């Protein structure tokens, strides 16, 4: 199989999957190395395909509704509550961004849609002994949130504000 044909198959696989596909899983399917798949995905992105890389694998960005970025601040221990507020009001947490004084903007793709995703994220954080990005900025961070409409986004903002998580620069 040529590289062009493999990339077309990879694009189809990612596009048709309802769950993120890891580079290792794709590599096994096509009997190539994980690094070949990483390169293939880079070439697909360079040709204009909106492939997101999450900690669980690759997905195609398919947005239905409105997307807004919101500034929040809380402790690491409050992360689960913050994510649950967003999810319970119908939002999807697409990413997290912090502004680092040395590296500039650092963004991590999350794609958290439901309770299982929250638990999986928290489990990966604890198992890998890594800190949350918010620890780099004393709790302040941004989330890109997808919602079905503006009213849903306003509900999320209101609930985050009531919980004391919405950032205000007073």
Image (cartoon, rainbow, N blue to C red):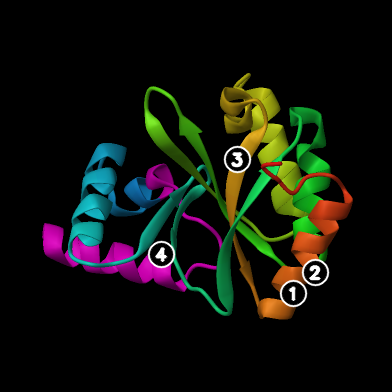
Mark closest to the chain's N terminus, 1 or 3: 3
Front tag of 2 and 4:
2
Quarter where residue 91 is shown: bottom right
Nearer to us in this view, 169 or 82: 169
Task: Tell me the residue at 49%/67% (across/down).
Answer: 17
Identify residue for label 2: 155
Distance from disc 1 to disc 3, alpha carbons, whole Å, reads 21 Å
* Residue 70 point in image, percent of width and height: 62, 55
Q: Is residue 143 visible?
A: yes
Mark closest to the chain's N terminus, 4 or 1: 4
* Residue 132 point in image, percent of width and height: 62, 29
Distance from disc 2 to disc 4, alpha carbons, whole Å, reads 32 Å
For the residues labelled 4 and 3, say whether their Cβ atoms are less than 8 Å apart: no
Distance from disc 1 to disc 2, alpha carbons, whole Å, reads 5 Å
Give, as a single range, the part of the protein colored magenta. 1-25
Identify residue for label 1: 152
Identify residue for label 4: 14
- In this rendering, position of residue 110 left or right of residue 45: right
Report crowding for label 3: few under 14, some 14 to 19, many 20 or more residues within 10 A (C-alpha): many
Distance from disc 3 to disc 2, alpha carbons, whole Å, reads 19 Å
Disc 4 is placed on an element classified as helix
Disc 1 is placed on an element classified as helix
Report crowding for label 1: few under 14, some 14 to 19, many 20 or more residues within 10 A (C-alpha): some
In the rendered structure, does residue 93 fall within the stretch colored magenta?
Answer: no
For the residues labelled 1 and 3, say whether their Cβ atoms are less than 8 Å apart: no
């Amino acid at each position: 199989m040529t590289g062009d044909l493999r990339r077309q198959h990879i694009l189809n696989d990612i596009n048709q999957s309802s769950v993120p596909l890891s580079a290792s899983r794709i590599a096994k399917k096509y009997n190539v190395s994980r690094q070949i798949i990483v390169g293939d995905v880079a070439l697909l992105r360079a040709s204009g395909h909106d492939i997101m890389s999450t900690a669980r694998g690759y997905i195609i960005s398919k947005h239905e509704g409105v997307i807004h970025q919101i500034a929040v601040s809380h402790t690491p221990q409050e992360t689960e509550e913050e994510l649950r507020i967003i999810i319970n009001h119908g939002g999807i947490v697409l990413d997290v961004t912090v502004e680092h004084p040395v590296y500039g903007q650092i963004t991590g793709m999350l794609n958290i849609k439901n309770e299982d995703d929250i638990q999986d994220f928290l489990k990966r954080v604890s198992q890998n002994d890594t800190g949350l990005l918010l620890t780099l900025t004393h709790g302040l961070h941004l989330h890109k949130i997808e919602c079905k409409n503006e009213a849903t986004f306003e509900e999320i903002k209101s609930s985050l504000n009531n919980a004391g998580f919405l950032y205000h620069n007073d």
